[in-house]
Image (cartoon, coloured by chain):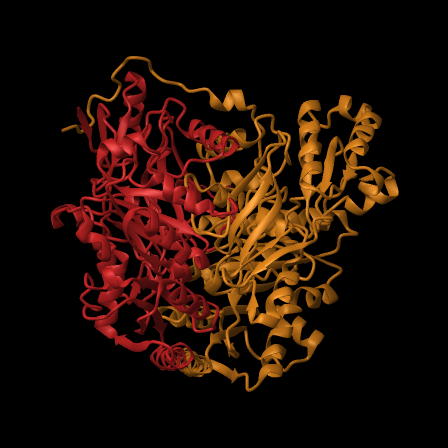
Chain colours: A red, B orange
Amino acid sequence: MSWFAPTDLGELRDAIGEALAVDEPLEVVAGGSKRGLGRPLQLPRTLDLSHLAGIRDYQPSELVLTAAAGTRIEEIDAVLAGAGQMLAFEPPDWGALFGQPSSVTSRRTLAGTLASNLSGPRRIKAGAARDHFLGFRGVSGRGEAFKAGGKVVKNVTGYDLCKLLAGSYGTLAALEEVTVKVQPKPEAVSTVLLCGLDAATAVRHLTRALGSPHEISGAVYIPASLTAGSASLSGLTSCAALRLEGPSPSVTFRREQLLFELGSDCEASSLEDEASIAFWRGIRDIQPLVEFGDRAIWRVSVAPARGAELGEAIGGSLDADWYLDWGGGLVWAAIADADDGGAAVIRAAIRGVDGRGTGHATLIKGPPELRRSIPVFEPQPPALAALAQRTKEAFDPRRILNPGRMVEGS
Amino acid sequence: MRMPMPDAAIIEHRADIVEALQRIVPGEGVIVSEAERRVYESDGLTAYRQLPLVVVLPSTVEQVAAVLRHCKGSGIKVVPRGAGTSLSGGALPLADGVLLGMAKFNRIVEIDYDNRCAVVQPGVTNLAITKAVEQAGFYYAPDPSSQIACTIGGNVAENSGGVHCLKYGLTTNNILGIEMVLMDGEVIRLGGKHLDAENYDLLGVMTGSEGLLGVVTEVTVRILPKPTAARALLVGFQTTEDAANCVAAVIAAGIIPAGMEMMDRPAIHAAEAFVKVGYPLDVDALIIVELDGPSAEVDYLIGKVEAIARDHNATTVRPSRDEPERLAFWSGRKAAFPAVGRISPDYYCMDGTIPRACLAEVLRRMQQLSDQYRLEIANVFHAGDGNLHPLILYDANRPEEVERAEAFGADILRLCVEVGGVLTGEHGVGVEKRDLMGTMFDESDLAHQQRLKCAFDPDGLLNPGKVFPQLHRCAELGRLHVHAGRMPFPDLPRF
């Protein structure tokens, strides 16, 4: 096992060039906090991007930040907070879910976050990591340096390769430098809690709120079995929660409106300021499922109005605990005692009774043997899978970067 | 404009091609006569014209697939077209190419309010989507100024923006899924009513790919609840520096307006002469800031922006008092292009983006270029996101002026790249900026993009001659040069 830790673009190119020359694939890591995601790898070489670190350009009024790929999220968060800004897509910290010590989770990097396209509850309003990824420089599996995108917020010059690299789990190129869009931190935040609702009613409430002009920036439903796990919700029964952010007078107005419009058939209350921030950090970090560390953890993206149907289909057939984010559009489920981790039931539930449902399920956490034996990412129809494979080959024809991390044999 | 050399053999077999297309799309779906083909000879970039070999207007996905499959089998190039409003020549036909018009795909398939999305065919206009959902309090956010005519299929191809994209994003941030046909006739669905991709984000790649990767046959767009209130603020400054500083200060204060537009003196005067809405004429720069949201928020933020404007030496500060006044403020900005069209026989609209901090410098240097090229210029500018639309005034009846205008435009775009910006913020590369790609991207950058093209269209038959300055064969692009077996990098840190 050799470990390569380039400190600049030239060394990164050399590391990949050398791996190509000797035909030894590389596992690409930055901070290493997400090594447990995807199909397990056992590769002869490790390419460590964590020495490519440091913020290179940041002008708050331009709303962009350029940093070396391996720059830690912690450092970026701190610098942005100093100018009253943030990464609006809420890069999650899944350290607790993965049972990692803080020394590992604190190593989360910008490159790792973008390469796995991970976003928090604000995804529904602010977009995903991919929507904030403006430009990069890196080295493809061909051992050639290249760049794409730009360092401005609005750009359509050439193909949008940032979108392609977002969520590609290091299988196409290793990033050396990235530029992301940043946003102002909201002046105020408040959370409306609607408790005592069953899942179907709760999703209807979330749908109404998200169809209202109240600019909801977080919409979750947590069933009674999981509220105990949240400090903010302990003592409460099942709860739907709606986040409001913005200027104080606006947040106050919208909170009162929501309580008036949706609070009549349930126990309605609100969380303010720090309590609200802590609650959504818990949602971002999958706090409700942390206690199920030994189970298979799934992340299922579906049409939001189908959230309750999905949760109940999964809970009805499997030994499962689940909750809903993204207004019902994201089902988080912890599955116990199923040979395939629940894959068949979950993936059939996505298609639905009429077979027309759209969506995908990703096994976020599970023992290596499970992640080897079932597709971790949603299998694609043959024509699409073939196109994805040709895309992989365009960037990495020798399968030198993270081969097999997303798809077996790819 | 140099286009790929027409293939004489294809042109010679035109009659066979027409016949084959007529078998696939019967009736009036194949346009053969020169007079009728003339309609398609250019898009919104009218400086370039080319009569297509033949025009085909399919009305089903199966027909699109059959047309593409046939063209691939016979090595015939295909140029897809929506409404033909591209400002970069993205739909410029080829003499030896089939023009594939998607106008007959004009149906709204489904509106799903609970999932806040609409499924539409690609020939539906941008504005028609908003019209279809507005009675329920929703709208489709991206609003390119051609929205009355441009189609959603074209918006996907160009990743279109508009005045509201600082807050609400471009097309790529507002679509959930597409159905598309590859050049080999394979029909593929990307995304759906859910968020994010299960594997590579090919939906993100398709958006803004300028018709080079596939033909979109259905789009699922996100629709948003319409904000309850919107107000605009009209602010005039004696210097563009003050205006630029004010824009930066608004954003630094944590405010992301729904729109923030700037006009320079020539643009203000042209617009005011045209629409007479009371723009101040004694200023060098005018900005329009629009805030939207609940009234409580809008009124609060209007107050904050007003204070920032006064701090930055604004000489005119007028908040809109009612909806007609807000629309009046916008009418001048929205009419800026036709207004400039009244004072000049022709104008050429550019589209670079720059870091906003460079605005004053870029405007100063554009003025120098204006003197150098002896052509007037007027500037409208999406100030919030740094997207410039300089309008170069010229007379198309004077060929020498056309050349000067093009050279002036190219210099402006080079300047945008030089200060850290990009060639195009929302209009696309097309044929217009194709030969400038080398100012922003090196050979390796472009080769990586073109290899992606090879994964979708290995024979390079879909919209060739656009975006990339040089065409390469996929086999040549795919060659990998590896120093076999050697360890060429002994100094690399390893531990």
B311 vs B20, nearest the viewer:
B20
- Name the residue rendered at 27%, 27% in the picture: A26
Q: Quadrant of the N terminus of chain B?
A: top right
- Name the residue rendered at 30%, 50% in the picture: A333
Question: Residue B365's spot in the image, x, y percent?
Answer: 51, 57
- Which image quadrant is residue A364 in? top left
Tell me if B7 is positioned left or right of B27 in this view.
left
Q: Is residue A242 visible?
A: yes
- The answer to whether residue B368 is above or below residue A211 is above
Q: Quadrant of the C terminus of chain B?
A: top left
- The answer to whether residue A284 is above or below residue B27 is below
Q: Residue furthest front?
A: A316
Question: Residue B59's spot in the image, x, y percent?
Answer: 73, 44
A324 vs A39, nearest the viewer:
A324
Question: Residue B208's spot in the image, x, y percent?
Answer: 54, 46
Question: Residue B280's spot in the image, x, y percent?
Answer: 59, 81
A216 vs B453, nearest the viewer:
A216
